Amino acid sequence: QQPVQSPQAVILREGEDAVINCSSSKALYSVHWYRQKHGEAPVFLMILLKGGEQKGHEKISASFNEKKQQSSLYLTASQLSYSGTYFCGTEGPSGAGSYQLTFGKGTKLSVIP
Amino acid sequence: DGGITQSPKYLFRKEGQNVTLSCEQNLNHDAMYWYRQDPGQGLRLIYYSQIVNDFQKGDIAEGYSVSREKKESFPLTVTSAQKNPTAFYLCASSIVWVNTGELFFGEGSRLTVL
């Protein structure tokens, strides 16, 4: 079951801030965030693990509320290079007893001068 | 340089034909994945493999098949049973479990059915 991302799209001017949300209906083990530019492969931004551990790029911040099964990605002082589609991927137990990553439909971010 | 190589980058297929997309990685990762991407749908998991000679169905496995005979290779076959195969296909790998680290993606293969 895909996590739900909001908003679906957002337009920012350089220097403005944005928050992208990701919500799941099932218990989560971790949340991943990726950014994809048009025609390119998704690029890793951050992993947030149950228990509070985070791994990722220094300039990206995010939160993970395990009880609410929600995560938010915070983009501050946006730059033109931030433009792209942001995907959250949620990891939880699958029926086969292993773990798989399920991605949301994405949030398209456009930063304009 | 380490990474994931997908080929071909573009592929055209006639209806009723099977096609195989190649995915090779030299990152020494145990886990490999195939995702399908359609506009507005995000990335949907087709198959994944955590060790050689073993693989699991993802959310949309119908009409697809895979093999994992070598650690570095995870080819995907799109069969004639796949009703709507036109899409962008992404291969990825990770160390073992996704929670231990990031997914590394290939550049993708765009399949068009004529």
Image (cartoon, rainbow, N blue to C red):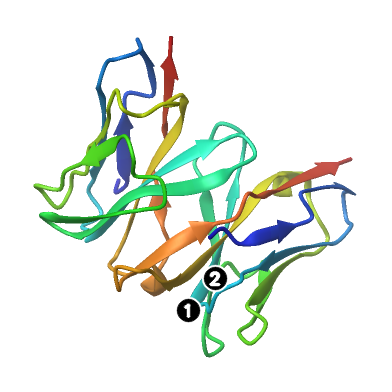
Q: How crowded is mark 1: few (under 14 residues within 10 Å), some or many (20 or more)?
A: some
Q: Which residue is drawn at 23% across and 39% down?
A: B65
Relative to B43, say whether A53 is above or below: below
The answer, for residue A18, to whether it is visible in the render is yes
Q: Which residue is drawn at 63% across and 78% down?
A: A69
Left or right: residue B109 versus residue B25 is right
- Quarter of the image with the C terminus of chain A is top right
> The disc numbered 1 marks a residue on which chain?
A
The image's mark for residue A29 is 1
> The disc numbered 2 marks a residue on which chain?
A
Q: Residues within 10 Å of mark 2 (few under 14, many from 20)?
A: many
Q: Residue at x 10, y 48 (%)?
A: B70
Q: Residue at x 67, y 68 (%)?
A: A23
Q: What's the CA distance linking mark 1 and mark 2?
A: 7 Å
Q: Is mark 2 on a helix, strand or loop?
A: strand
Relative to B7, say whether B33 is above or below: below
Indicate the amino acid at tag 1. Answer: Tyr
Q: Where is residue B20 in the image (x, y as percent from the top left)?
A: 24, 27
Left or right: residue B52 versus residue A90 is left
Q: Position of residue B40 (x, y in %)?
A: 65, 39
Indicate the amino acid at tag 2. Answer: Val
Q: Where is residue A75 in the image (x, y as percent from the top left)?
A: 76, 62
Choose top left, top right, bottom left or bottom right for residue B12: top left
Relative to B25, say whether A23 is above or below: below
Relative to A77, say whether A37 is above or below: above
The answer, for residue B107, to whether it is visible in the render is no
Choose top left, top right, bottom left or bottom right for residue B97: bottom left
Q: What element carries label 1?
A: loop
Q: Where is residue A81 in the image (x, y as percent from the top left)?
A: 71, 45
Left or right: residue B112 versus residue B38 is left
Left or right: residue B38 versus residue A76 is left
The image's mark for residue A31 is 2
